[in-house]
């Protein structure tokens, strides 16, 4: 495992400070404060009672995994290799390696095609461990994001009902597409303006990836933890990181919007119109 000192040495503090117009000392201090928190978040025991009922896990994972991708880019490292260098939790490493292998990450991450990109993210919550790889296409005219493929690995201890677990994970991925790409409550003059399923865009069939690939890691030596929420947390940051690979633009909020995109939250066409 590379130590934090090795990680800090790879981060171009002065370049970041120049981009932000900030003092390099302040940037260095901020990064040295944040990075240990982010790395410890990757390595924590997901069965720790302090993490067992974290209703903000989706947002926290989006922030952590997006920022880790930025650190990997700044260090000139592959996002998968960068994470594996700093993740200590063996169960999280296992799902990340499985998802990357089934997705063929190494070859696909090296490929370059205009408007297309791949991204990955991982996380742990409520006793479950998840990693997701996605491929996206970004429309150059309106910034619309299409998720072409999602490959997710999930482990939650002993698998009691494989088919039910698989469909639970598939449903979580589809549900996660909503806040990742469209779901947002709109307000005007203090009133909600998209308070119906017609105006509030949840995922539809046209939004689904062409390929949805789920891999379950069975751990009969461990108690079952279930899959009620954890499988949802990795899809959004994986999409954001894939969008960066496709466009060079970072998304730091959900739903993911590119600066040039003209579609409004809650509206617009999905895949196929």
Image (cartoon, rainbow, N blue to C red):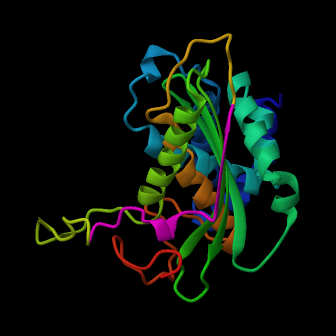
The number of callouts visible is: 0
**Which residue sits at x=45%, y=37%?**
57
Q: Where 197 sits versus 137, above or below?
A: above
Q: Quadrant of residue 216?
A: top right
Q: Is residue 230 magenta?
A: no
Q: Which residues are magenta?
A: 199-216
Quadrant of the image containing the N terminus? top right
**Which residue sits at x=41%, y=66%?**
182
For this view, does 130 lie left or right of residue 191? right
For this view, does 110 lie left or right of residue 207? right
Q: Where 207 sits versus 103, above or below?
A: below
Q: Is residue 205 magenta?
A: yes
**Which residue sits at x=61%, y=85%?**
140
Q: Is residue 206 visible?
A: yes
Q: Is residue 28 visible?
A: no
- Residue projecting furthest to the bottom: 141
Residue 246 location (% of width, % of height): 69, 71
Depth check, front residue: 84 or 111: 111
Depth check, front residue: 26 or 93: 93
For this view, does 100 lie left or right of residue 252? right
Residue 235 location (% of width, % of height): 56, 51
Q: Where 71 sits versus 194, above or below?
A: above
**Which residue sits at x=18%, y=65%?**
195
Depth check, front residue: 183 or 49: 183
Q: Quadrant of residue 91?
A: top right
Residue 167 location (% of width, % of height): 52, 41
Residue 71 location (% of width, % of height): 70, 50
């Amino acid at each position: 495992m590379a130590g934090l000192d090795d990680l800090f040495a790879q981060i171009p503090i002065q370049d970041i400070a120049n981009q932000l117009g900030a003092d390099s000392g302040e940037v260095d201090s901020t990064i040295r404060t944040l990075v240990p928190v982010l790395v410890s978040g990757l390595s924590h025991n997901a069965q720790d009672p302090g993490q067992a009922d974290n209703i903000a896990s989706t947002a926290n994972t989006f922030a952590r995994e997006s920022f880790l991708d930025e650190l990997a880019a700044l260090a000139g490292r592959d996002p998968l290799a960068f994470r594996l260098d700093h993740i200590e939790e063996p169960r999280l490493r296992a799902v990340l390696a499985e998802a990357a292998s089934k997705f063929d990450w190494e070859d696909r991450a090296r490929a370059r095609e205009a408007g297309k990109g791949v991204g990955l993210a991982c996380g742990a919550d409520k006793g479950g461990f998840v990693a997701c790889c996605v491929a996206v296409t970004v429309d150059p005219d309106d910034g619309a994001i299409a998720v072409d493929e999602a490959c997710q690995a999930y482990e939650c201890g002993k698998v009691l009902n494989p088919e039910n677990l698989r469909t639970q994970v598939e449903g979580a991925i589809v549900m996660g597409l909503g806040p990742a790409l469209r779901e947002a409550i709109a307000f005007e003059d203090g009133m909600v303006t998209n308070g119906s399923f017609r105006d509030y865009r949840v995922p539809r069939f046209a939004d689904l990836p062409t390929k949805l690939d789920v891999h379950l890691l069975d751990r009969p030596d461990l108690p079952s933890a279930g899959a009620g929420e954890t499988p949802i947390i990795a899809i959004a940051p994986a999409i954001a990181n894939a969008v960066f690979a496709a466009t060079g633009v970072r998304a730091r909020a959900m739903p993911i919007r590119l600066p040039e995109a003209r579609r409004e939250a809650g509206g617009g066409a999905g895949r196929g119109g």
